[in-house]
Amino acid sequence: MATFTTDPNKRPPLPSDSPRPNGTRATTVLTADCEFKGALAFSGELQLHGRLEGTIESEGGSLMIGEEAMIKAEIRVNDVQIHGKVQGNVYATGRIELRGKAEVYGDLHTNRLAMDDGVVFVGKSNTLSGKNQPSSDFSKMFTRLGVASKNGTTPSTVKEA
C-alpha cells in the first residue's frame, strides 16, 4: 500500500521539484485510461488523452488534446492544440490549432486560429481583443458593374469597345 504526503521533507523528490533550465516547461500527461470530472488547473504543458468533464484553466499554459481524448469543458489557456473531440467553448490568449481528425462543438475565442482540412468545427470563431477589428471597404469592389448600373443597363448588355 502506497502512502502519500504533501510534506516535501517526508517524500522522495519529484522531477518537478528539481530546478529546470531556462526555457523548459514541465509537461504533465494524462493517459487514455484517465477519466476526470471537475476543475483542472495546470502550469507548463498538459497532454490530455483521456476523458474530462468540467473546466480546464491555465494562465500561460499550453494544452494538447490527443486523438482519443473526449472533453466536455470550458477551456481557458494560452495555447491549445486539439486532435480529439471537444464540446465547449475554448478561450486561448495565444493560439488555437485544430489538427487531424479534431471535432469541436463550441465557440472559439482567440486572435490566432489554424485548422486542418477535414476538421469538424460547429460553432463561431471570435477574436479575443475587445477592440473593433478594422474591416475592409468593399463598396468600390465592382468598377464595371457600377458603371453599367448607373447607365441603366445590365452587365449582359454592356458592350466592350
Image (cartoon, grey):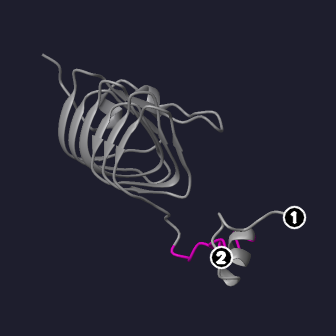
User: Which amino acid type is marked by label 1?
Assistant: Ala
Q: Quadrant of the N terminus?
A: top left
Residue 19 place in picture, x, y as percent: 56, 34
N-term-proximal mark, 1 vs 2? 2
Residue extending farthest to the right is 161
The secondary structure that most of the magenta stretch takes on is: loop
Residue located at (62% from left, 72% from top):
135
The residue closer to the viewer here, 114 or 18, is 114
User: Which amino acid type is marked by label 2?
Assistant: Thr
Residue named by callout 2: 153
Q: How many marks?
A: 2
Residue 114 appears left or right of 154: left
Residue extending farthest to the top is 1
Residue 37 place in picture, x, y as percent: 16, 41
Residue located at (50% from left, 34% from top):
116
Residue 47 place in picture, x, y as percent: 40, 31
Residue named by callout 1: 161
Few, some or many residues within 10 Å of mark 1 (<14, 14–19, 20+)? few
Q: Is residue 100 above or below residue 63?
A: above
